[in-house]
Amino acid sequence: MKDASARLGRLGRRTGALIATHPFTTAMTGLILVLALVTGPIHGPRRPLHIWLGTGPGPLIDGHWWTSITSVLFTDDLAELIVALILTVVLVGAAEQLMGTWRTALAYFATAVVGTVGGVALQLLASTTGEMWARNVHNLVVLDVFTALGGTIMTASAFAGALWRRRIRVLTVLIAVMYVLYSGMPSDVYRLLAVLAGLGLGVLLRPGARLAGWVRSSHHEIRVLLASAVTITAVGPVIGLLTTSRYGLLSPIALLFTSDVPDRGSLLERCQAFAVTRQCVHDLTIERINGLGPILLSVLPLLVLLVAAYGLLRGNRFALWLAVAVNALLALLSALYFGILPLGAAPRPHVGARYWEVTAILALSALLPLAIAILLIAFRQHFPVRPPAKSVRRYVLTVLVSGVVLAGLYVLIGYLQKDTGFTRPLDLSDLLDDVLERFVPVSFLRREPVQYLPTTPLAIFVYRNIGTVFWLIVILGALPVMRGRASWRKGATDAGRVRSLLERGGGDPISFMATWPGNDYWFDPVDGRAIAYRVVGRVAITLGGPFGGQPPHDRSIDRFARFCDDNGWTPVFYSVDAGLQPLFDEMGWSTMVVAEETVIRPQQWETTGKKWQDVRSSINRAQRAGIRAEWTTFQALPLSAAVQLSDISEQWVAEKDLPEMGFTLGGLDELRDPAVMLMLAVDEAGRIEAVTSWLPSYRDGLVVGWTLDFMRRRPGSINGVMEFLIAEAATRMRDEGVEFMSLSAAPLAHTAAGGEADARGMDRILNFLSVSLEPVYGFRSLLKFKRKFQPELHPLIMAYPDPVALPAIGIALVRAYLPQLSVRQAVALASGRS
């Protein structure tokens, strides 16, 4: 009993604190609830009051200036009231947390006024031109709480961090556009304008907030945003079904709820080619969609997009092309059946202006899937996970064969029943002309004249269901391809062979990076060693030296150089141990120092003495704050912890003005490898404050060392949390008998001498690149940080055969580290404005 009372007391105190810190949110939630209870929570305000409180062209023309404010305080029914109360608490509460009370109040009412007044002005302007939509909705009176909510959260986005700012803006605008396209009510237009007004108001309230341009995102975040966009566009057509508007792709399904089913004979007589009236379209849709099969046929292509969105989250390239194919198909069908593209060579009949207006409105549905398809293609490089080619070929063959077989089945059964199974006798050409339409969602056929309809049970079943079966095969066949074991660039055989060689040992501390996406592999035909490399332009850059066998690696290096020469590539050994310098001197190659690896011997680890004062202070500070270290893997993390890691990483990446770097620098995706270990800093509440990842080094199947890769800390975390994590990792490795602990090498940062005279040109290029990147990525600062731990400094060199190729090598290195670098960013980098 006491425990229950204590819990209630704590809950009451927390609620009181939230109310005290969010007064506007509390006031608006209470006001909306009270007004709904007074005016009718079930069905909203009655008509006279509805007209007096709601907004639209009529009320504003009549002088009801207050309606642009009162319209965002009332709801139309109980379901809308519940959703509005929840979103007010969540969205307005988040906005008040971000930008304070008075700014939130200003945003709530200012964006509502701008959105409604601007929307009404657009309606009146369109009405004067005779535009059909504006005339049809002219007399509607709107009550819509969501107009103010959308404008408020969009204003607050200017006060959020770069990560959440982008998420709020992209998703809010996309949802608002979806409602305009698939519902088309005046409230949807007002809401979109309020959202855009909120975007501008946020910039006015916080001038430093970034409005134009794309804030840089990591691969993972781009996948999340694109998957969200595909999901919203797939779910969007349902909006047309759930509203009274009838512009959405799924709107014909709503016609099933009518009771006036037309007679088939009279239907065909009235709806011949080029005699399509509004009532005829209505009747054709009812007949075409009658039955479960046609309903599923309209829904299943959208379900394919949801399946593809799931694959996009996993970085699956197959899912990307599946989403592109479905969106392109929907765009093409919209263009064909809504009159943008001609259906054939037959001349068009004379039609009135309203016909073309309706066609233009419906054709908007072609633009959105086309835009999504183009966007996915433009960002395809962020989806490197490729299923085995055999699985993809099997899927494509299955879909093609299924389509041909089902089409043949329809033609065969139709021909066998050509005299008795349809409303008129058929010949083979009739069936061939109609067969493709059996696979098309019914919503795209609502303006197509019907030539015949089935009458017997067998003909009806085949007529209505072969398309459904086909799309089910498309969906069910795609799931195992996306969920199955996938490779990044090479087949599973190469990936397995590389891991086997890594476990054998003999490589560098960075050799495990060979498992990362983007690498190609060369396997020594003589002794089986491997080298990971990537070709940029005509330059083949290795990721360290050979692995899979104990040194010396002389002959493997020589054979790899010959392999590159045979392919017309310039070989470059990058970040290899300086101990190989004599070999490259013997080969006549040039070398230069490009980095310094920082190595700690865990068996000698201790933090005594004056040099360790900063590290000891950081450890003590973290312990006093109740922070503990946790050694784990990504797979072992609960979902909440994985989400925290994602947010920490994305906030770090989003604040950069240049893309996320790759090559020898891992990101969030590389943490998911089961062989990679994580050391987390976790506070008493279970919140992750910082994370480091460690790559294994093997000898004869046993881990003998760990290499630091991924380092991120939560903004606002205590000072010294990274020192704490590295110290805890060193202590653990000492206890486990690990031979070495590498803090890795900061790219393009070192303290060693420059190298040979003929390398000075390249040294100047890399030094310039290092200086340019320092304000963004801080590699030199990172090297200084690592030297706190009193490590051994091992120079790493780059070796290349021909100094004439230095400009090409410099460009190749930039493109290897920054493959997503745009022209604008490259110019900024070259001019020192990165």
Image: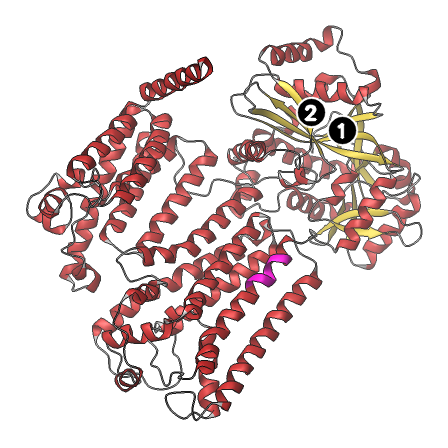
Report whether residue 207 is seen. no
> Looking at the image, which residue sits at the far left?
62
Q: Is residue 477 magenta?
A: yes
Seen from the viewer's position, the closer of residues 67 and 240 is: 240
Amino acid type of disc 2? Leu
Q: Which residue is mark 1?
A: 596
Q: Position of residue 87 (x, y in %)?
A: 34, 37
> Looking at the image, which residue sits at the far front?
1
User: Position of 411 compared to 802: left or right?
Assistant: left
Answer whether labels 1 and 2 touch (C-beta < 8 Å). Answer: yes
User: Position of 458 compared to 390: left or right?
Assistant: left
The span shown in magenta is 475-480
User: Position of 107 compared to 731: left or right?
Assistant: left
Q: Earlier in the sequence, mark 1 or mark 2?
A: 1
Q: Position of residue 277 (x, y in %)?
A: 24, 77
Quadrant assignment for the N terminus: top left
Q: Quadrant of residue 737?
A: top right
Q: Is residue 160 magenta?
A: no
For the residue carrying disc 2, how many other residues have a C-alpha within 10 Å: few (<14), some (14-19), or many (20+)?
many
> Looking at the image, which residue sits at the far top?
610
Distance in Å between CA atoms under marks 1 and 2: 8 Å
Amino acid type of disc 1? Glu
Q: Position of residue 423 (x, y in %)?
A: 37, 88
Q: Residue at x 45, y 50 (%)?
A: 229
Secondary structure of residue under mark 2: helix
User: Is 721 placed above or below 503 here?
Assistant: above
Q: Which residue is mark 2?
A: 783
Q: Residue at x 29, y 47 (%)?
A: 192
